[in-house]
Image (cartoon, coloured by chain):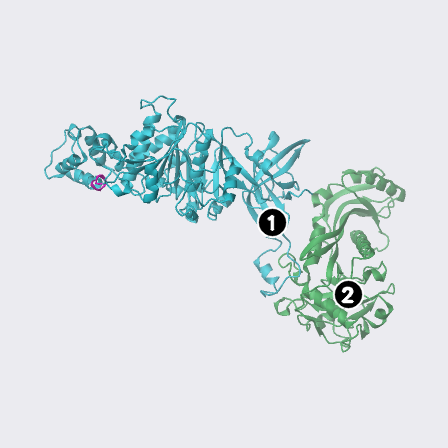
Amino acid sequence: MPSTVIGKVSATEKNPTCTDNFIFWLDDNVEIKPFDIVKAINEVQGKKSITYAIVEDIFHITDSTGHLSNYVSSDFGDIACPPMTKRLGVTYANAKVIKNTHEIYMPLKDSTLVEFADEDDIKDALGLNDIKNPIAAGFIEGANNVTVPINLNSDFLIGPEGAHLNISGISGLATKTSYAMFLLQSIQQTIDDAAIVILNVKGDDLLRIHEENPLLSEKDKKVWEKTGLSCKPFEKVKYYYPYKNNKDGYYANTILDKSALSKQVDADVMRNFIYTYDHDKNNIDLIFSNVDDPSFTMESIINVIMESPEFCDLSWDDFKAKLGEKCASGGKKNGNVEIPVQSWRKFKRLIHKSINNQFFINSKSGSADRRQCFLSDEVKNIKKKDVFVIDVARLEEQLQCLVFGDILKAVNELKFGETARSEEDIPGRVIIFVDELNKYAASNAPKNSPILRYLLEITERGRSEGIILFSAEQFKSAIHDRVKGNCSTHIYGRTNAIEISKPDYKYIPKVFSNMMTRLSKGELILEHAILGTPLKMTFPYPSYYQRGSEDGE
Amino acid sequence: MNRILNLLSARGIKCFQTERFNLDHKYLEQYEDEGEIFDSNLVFESEHKSGEFIKIDRASKDSFFRYFLDGSRYTYKIADMETTDGKYLPIVAGQVATGVTTRDGEKIRKHILKNKNLMLVSDRTNQDDLAEIKEEVKQFDRVSIQIETYNSKRDSKSRPENLAIARIQKIMMDMEIEILSEIARSRTLKPDAMLIIDGSLQFIDKGDDRLFSNVIGLSKSFNPNLQGMLRRKNDEIGVVLTKLKYGERSPVYKYPMRDNSRVIGAWYLRIRDENRMKNPLDGIVKLEKIAIDADEKDNGFESGLIDNISASILAERNVTCYGSDPRWHNHIYPIYMTEKMLKASFLGTEHFLNIF
């Protein structure tokens, strides 16, 4: 018997084999795991086909009719009583067919030998051999010590055939950011006409991605080699921080430590972004993205601000004064639109705190030290292979919405030809990575949320225009259906039992969704448009500098 | 009518289709030790001459037993036939399996398995016709069928179906002896690797006594109405054994075989806590051993040997087939597993009946 044979197909009256599934019993000394890929030869009328299947549930049964029988078999409950003979038992597994070579869909017959799939088999089973435009996406590891690199077809990951990726999982254990960064690294090394925009939403996790990771061991580097990628940090990285009038801190409102910031200043890879009234008046609506506005009063006020001549040619200070006027008792009415003073007061209250942030300035400084820039202008000038990291970690939620919305708007304008740049010069695909997507596209987000509108535009039409969203969040169920529904790639990290009880996980085999609650750090489940089945995978240790790399995410 | 019965019809043996059914549940079998007569003059072992029960060490975790032999059969009535001399007799088919399992570590594995598919017609069938039919059946490539006859003249009081079943039973026992001889010749059995035969040894009338040196017969059921036990000659054994406690055995009783010089020692052992049983005789097994040499035949067995064998049987009490077999309290699991192996080797009833 070849050593890779692990069991035999078992077809019974109650559990027949079928085109989609079969059960096989296991040799007593074999260890398998859910997600392992197995194969069996299906011989039908002289034609030999290989059936590949992925292991789902694994069971162990004995001939005991019940717990009572086991209790009796231990001398009526004597725990110390050893049995002379082990009860007849068998371990068996459910396997879901993922591929039949030679298009034979006949069920496997009883007693057909089942083998572990080796590396070539796994590639054949998953169609990894003929992947076009491959992008390294990690590894799958079988219980038979086989490690197979997974490549995804870029056409299905970042368009035009399929696009957008969503990663979910609980913080700290799911390694969502690390995996997204690995995939972005893979894209940067593989795709020449792609540019990447990354939002750093917490800590300084993503603020040193151009620096090497000192904690990488030789073993880690070899894992990178196996993927076919170079183990190196990101290249062509620029960092954008909210402007703050603080000379000692290089005018950047960031958590990043000064020495690292100083190196970025020396290397001229950092800028501080600002918002002036003149340049960004039209983005004010983004600050109200998560404000519930059932009577559209805020929207009316924003329309007035954008269109009324009295709100033109102002500074932020003038704007505040103008708002003060509107909020004064007996304030003027605006044309035909009746906006009560109470609404203006509410508007003022909501916006006041935000526009007091130091990155709202009256006019852009010409001082080179301040490194001021308009974020949207920078994004509209992004080059192929560029990586922009925009730090919003220290901004409050409304301002994070403003910045993210500003980026989305800029990328939209860039890709929809609203800039003077030539087509050849514009990156073919701009990938935007944002964590905590639930802040911007929550399932209960206000319907008229401008940021949600941009996200829907990107996820529904961006695929063909080359605007790709890589997003992450703790709980997938909290994300707007149309945003996640348009993703061709879904990644699941460790999550909790409440989450997997949600309808989002209904079509994932129960054993796989249960596995999601037990995934170790660095283990993820991949669901991709062209793979017939979810796969459990791992990926290399981050190649860029991370604060306290041992913390993982 | 199907293929094999066609062969009979072709030779003028009229076959009539009947409802084909399993005979195994139709006839209540006798106790294997029905009519057993004890030599009441002595306790057939070196000690315990007083005839009192003997306490066995329940804590023993070792067993001398490594091999477990059993036979199993399914019998079916498949048709009736008319003989040339005007008799109306059944045609009976049977599937017979005998086999040995072995314990490898804590697990039971197949050691030997032999199967036979039988068709029994009356011995009133013409011998030459029968020989031709046997030859033709040998050519069958699907399933091997052995044609046998049953003696329909001998015992007019028994129903002919029973006579056919008795013949099948005999074939099964011969197969058991064959397997036992095979194992004995291979010198597989040793004092620390003994074999248990399921059932009484007294029906095994073939074979050299020495084949049975390391063999024990274990009966799950026994006749509780036997009398003549030692000093309590008037008490039936069922009454005597109600006083047998968990982990106790009776002394060895001797009974000589009527047809030959074989001498068997038999004793009873309670392997389950009597307080947990529904019936006072539940949990008691009957053990038998054939006396091998002249000294054993005359003076009985060494009590130490019987104690050790009993301790081994006690150690076999767990795990149990509770819930799967109503005789669980008198069963030991390796024998139960051997039975399962044999039954699993049989063809499905529909499949088997449609061969004929």
Q: In this view, does A468 lie to the left or right of A324?
A: right
Residue A457, label in figure = none
Compared with residue A390, is residue B69 higher up or lower down, i.e. above or below? Answer: below
Front label number (1 vs 2): 1
Which chain letter goes with mark 1? A
Compared with residue B269, is residue A316 higher up or lower down, i.e. above or below? Answer: above
Q: Nearer the viewer, residue A421 or A282?
A: A421
Q: In this view, does A422 lie to the left or right of B165?
A: left
Chain for colour cyan: A
Can residue A318 be seen in this snapshot?
yes
Residue at the extreme bottom of the image, as rendered: B50
Q: Which amino acid does label 1 sit on?
A: Thr
Q: Is residue A355 magenta?
A: yes
Q: Mark 1 points at which residue?
A: A91
Q: Quadrant of residue B173?
A: bottom right
Q: Name the residue under label 2.
A: B288
Q: Colour of chain B?
A: green
Q: Which region shows up in magenta?
A: A352-356
